[in-house]
């Protein structure tokens, strides 16, 4: 019997540890820009909703409360421009990472099936394929690079982690039409959708893209970034009712329930846009400061029109850049964590406090 771990890549973050130690030795402490974890407070109204639901002795349901489903369908229509979204078109998940990792398994994919994802991507798409013993395939352009007879699940990620690239509406239309023509299921990871800076990200659920029907497409949304809720594990799917119905059944058997207080907190979070706008302001200021300082320091920035990251290069191997920045007390993520094509870039997250971002700017000579 082979261990499941044999199928998985080595956890890359361990390789960063020596650089973390170097950066931490800076007299004024490390500026850790290597991970995209929120650092600002959970908005008060969300905390209050969580606390108000603290007395929740019974089991929650996988599909969530009626109030949660109303909040999900309402948000999807209001914010994504989708139309006619019913409760059968939504499904809560326990943060989106578990969904990404277990989706191919829950869809029943296995040997001989391909799971495709962008050439530079969040590593969990590949992990999900490997957990299911399916074949992971990276693409630049799905239409040019993939064999639709073999691909069973196509991941899109716009805005992208790590590059911040946004797929234009025309591009989404082209990909969705191709996938539908060939019966390829599309899952579109849109967890950075509310974090567009120089582009306005569009959902696959927008009627211009999907034609007002959700057949063969599902969008993945997370509250981790938009509402500083990474610690709560709050995310959801929206789209094809048949696919979500199957996932609901499987996830019921698997006990994959969002805790009741988190469901209540999600209702509050999706009903409020003010905290999202406030958080965007914070990130916009940090992004501008880091961007200017990195460019003045000799970095070139590609894409990065959305998301929480700057995708930067000095046209040298990424680990040399990581070492250079660590010497300044700044930790960045090497681009090869996201695929070999990233080996001359590093990813700089702007999820650090104003004080730490100011420290980084100073160290970069800004
Ligand atoms: C592209 C992408 N998808 C999914 C996730 C997982 O987010 P969460 O599990 O917090 O919803 C992340 C987290 O960084 C991400 O970058």
Image (cartoon, grey):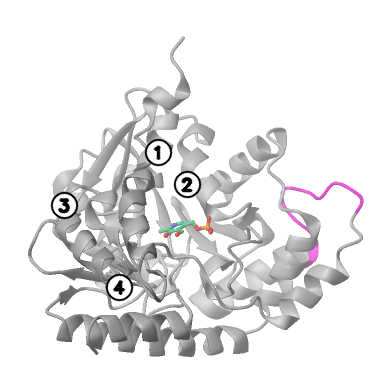
From this viewpoint, which residue is outermost toward the left?
Answer: 315
Q: Position of residue 108 (x, y in %)?
A: 49, 29
Q: Which residues are magenta?
A: 57-67
How far apart marks 1 and 4 lie (CA) works out to 28 Å
Secondary element at tag 1: helix
The residue wearing badge 3 is: 341
Quadrant placement of the C terminus: bottom left
Is 342 situated above or below 5? below
Q: Position of residue 237 (x, y in %)?
A: 56, 56
Residue 127's disc is 1
Assess disc 2: are there few (<14), some (14-19) or many (≥20) residues with their C-alpha within 10 Å of its C-alpha: many
How far apart marks 2 and 3 lie (CA) works out to 21 Å
Q: Earlier in the sequence, mark 2 or mark 3?
A: 2
Q: Quadrant of residue 362?
A: bottom left
The residue wearing badge 4 is: 169
Assess disc 4: are there few (<14), some (14-19) or many (≥20) residues with their C-alpha within 10 Å of its C-alpha: some
Q: Position of residue 321 (x, y in %)?
A: 18, 63
Is 254 placed left or right of 170 in the picture?
Answer: right
Q: Earlier in the sequence, mark 2 or mark 4?
A: 2
Confirm or deny contact between disc 1 and disc 2 (CB under 8 A). Answer: yes
Instruction: Between label 1 and label 2, give the one nearer the viewer.
Output: 1
Residue 100's disc is 2
Secondary element at tag 2: helix
Q: Quadrant of residue 28?
A: bottom left
Assess disc 1: are there few (<14), some (14-19) or many (≥20) residues with their C-alpha within 10 Å of its C-alpha: many
Confirm or deny contact between disc 2 and disc 4 (CB under 8 A). Answer: no
């Amino acid at each position: 019997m082979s261990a499941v771990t044999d199928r998985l890549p080595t956890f890359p973050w361990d390789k960063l540890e020596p650089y973390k130690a170097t950066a931490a030795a800076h007299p004024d402490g490390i500026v850790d820009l290597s991970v995209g974890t929120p650092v600002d407070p959970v908005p008060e109204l969300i905390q209050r909703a969580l606390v108000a639901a603290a007395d929740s002795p019974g089991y929650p349901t996988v599909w969530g409360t009626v109030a949660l489903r109303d909040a999900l369908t309402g948000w999807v229509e209001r914010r994504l421009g989708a139309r006619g979204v019913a409760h059968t078109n939504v499904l809560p998940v326990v943060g989106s990472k578990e969904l990404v990792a277990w989706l191919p398994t829950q869809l029943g994919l296995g040997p001989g099936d391909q799971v495709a994802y962008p050439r530079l991507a969040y590593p969990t798409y590949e992990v999900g394929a490997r957990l299911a013993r399916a074949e992971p395939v990276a693409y630049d352009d799905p239409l040019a690079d993939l064999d639709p007879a073999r691909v069973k699940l196509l991941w899109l990620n716009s805005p992208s982690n790590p590059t911040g690239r946004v797929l234009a509406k025309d591009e989404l239309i082209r990909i969705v039409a191709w996938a539908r023509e060939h019966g390829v299921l599309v899952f579109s990871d849109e967890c950075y959708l509310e974090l567009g800076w120089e582009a306005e990200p569009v959902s696959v659920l927008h009627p211009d893209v999907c034609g007002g029907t959700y057949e063969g497409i599902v969008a993945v949304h997370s509250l981790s970034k938009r509402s500083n809720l990474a610690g709560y594990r709050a995310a959801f799917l929206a789209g094809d009712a048949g696919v979500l119905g199957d996932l609901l059944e499987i996830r019921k058997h698997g006990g994959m329930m969002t805790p009741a207080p988190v469901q209540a907190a999600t209702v509050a979070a999706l009903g409020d846009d003010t905290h999202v706008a406030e958080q965007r302001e914070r990130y916009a200021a940090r992004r501008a400061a880091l961007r200017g300082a990195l460019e003045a320091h000799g970095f070139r920035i590609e894409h990065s029109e959305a998301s929480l990251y700057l995708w930067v290069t000095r046209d040298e191997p990424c680990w040399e850049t990581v070492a250079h920045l660590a010497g300044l007390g700044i930790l960045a993520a090497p681009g090869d964590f996201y695929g070999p094509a990233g080996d001359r870039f590093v990813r700089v997250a702007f999820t650090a406090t104003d004080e730490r971002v100011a420290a980084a700017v100073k160290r970069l000579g800004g």
